Structures are given as C-alpha cells and as structure tokens.
Image: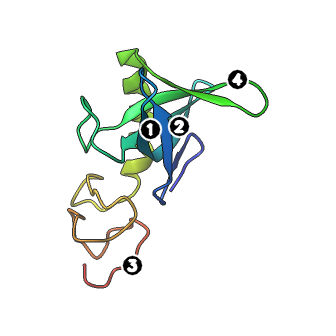
Amino acid sequence: MDNENCEIFDDDEIITLQDEDGNPIKFIEVACVEYEDEYYVLLSPAQEVEGIADDEVIICKLEDQDDETQLIVPVQDEDLMQKVFDEYLKTADDCCDCDDCNGDCDCDGECDDDCDCHHEHCHCGCEDEDK
C-alpha cells in the first residue's frame, strides 16, 4: 500500500547492514517515506538485535553517495524520527477504514489471525471471508 509520500512494502525484502564493528545485521524493509524532499527507510530487525525490540523499527535516511550508491544512515534526531514515523502512520492507518477499529487494525493489508478488527467491512485490501 502506498500514497504519494509513503510506500509500504508487502514482501519481506531483507537487507544487510553493518554495525560499528563491521558485523552484518539483517533487517526487513518495512516502508520508504518521503518527508521534506528527503527519503527515509523504516527497517525492522530480521534477527535479534541488542537494543531493538522485535516490534520496533529504526528509521534511516537514504543519502546518495554517487549515481550507483546510496548510504543508509540512522536518524538520530528524535523530532525528525517522529515526523517521519507519523508520515508512515498516515499510510498504515489507511489499511483499515472501518469505524469500529478507528484505523487501529494491525493486519497491514493481509488478513490473518493478527487482524484486530475482524469486521467484514474492513477495507484493508484483502478479502478474507472468514472475518
């Protein structure tokens, strides 16, 4: 699902970053967000990472190094992180527009047992007749 400023990735594309010591860490790309003409990527750990809970994301800025290379730089500014995350939430909340869950449905476009609203009129983009 996407809007003009945010694309939420449906597949579990994994990228590998390196920590300060050069150790590889795998992350799942959750979304790409455009905010104030800059691009940010939201990443979720694909493995256990010290200091990051399984349900948390990190927000990184995409910086062009040259025509072929982009750097993924963690955002440190708390205010900027919140603004980028809020832009992401605008799209994520569009997943479900039923009045009963007020956009708090966590099915992220895929109906499964984790969907909180379980309403037939949920317009999250999937048609699961069991719900």
Q: Badge 2: few (under 14), some or many (20 or more) residues near its Cα, within 10 Å?
A: many
Q: Work out whether mark 3 precedes mark 4 in sequence or the reverse, and give the earlier one.
A: 4
Residues marked 3 and 2 touching at CB (< 8 Å): no
Q: Badge 3: few (under 14), some or many (20 or more) residues near its Cα, within 10 Å?
A: some
The three-letter amino acid code for the residue at tag 3 is: Glu
Secondary-structure class at tag 2: strand
Mark 3–mark 2 Cα distance, whole angstroms, equals 27 Å
Is 103 positioned to the left or the right of 33 in the image? left
Query: With respect to residue 15, does 119 lie above or below?
Result: below
Q: At which x and y percent is residue 26?
A: 42, 43
Q: At which x and y percent is residue 126?
A: 41, 73
- Using the image as rendered, state which of residue 64 and residue 117 is in the foreground: 64
Mark 4–mark 1 Cα distance, whole angstroms, equals 19 Å
Tell which tag, 1 or 3, sits nearer the viewer: 1
Is 130 positioned to the left or the right of 18 in the image? left
Residue 33, disc: 2
Please name the residue shown 27% across and 42% down the image.
48
* Mark 4, residue position: 65
Tell which tag, 4 or 1, sits nearer the viewer: 4
The three-letter amino acid code for the residue at tag 1 is: Leu
Q: Locate residue 109: give its quadrant.
A: bottom left
Secondary-structure class at tag 1: strand
- Using the image as rendered, state which of residue 127 and residue 110 is in the foreground: 110
* Mark 3, residue position: 127
Q: Badge 4: few (under 14), some or many (20 or more) residues near its Cα, within 10 Å?
A: few
Secondary-structure class at tag 4: loop
* Mark 1, residue position: 42
Is 131 positioned to the left or the right of 28 in the image? left
Q: Work out whether mark 2 precedes mark 4 in sequence or the reverse, and give the earlier one.
A: 2
Query: With respect to residue 120, does 94 lie above or below?
Result: above
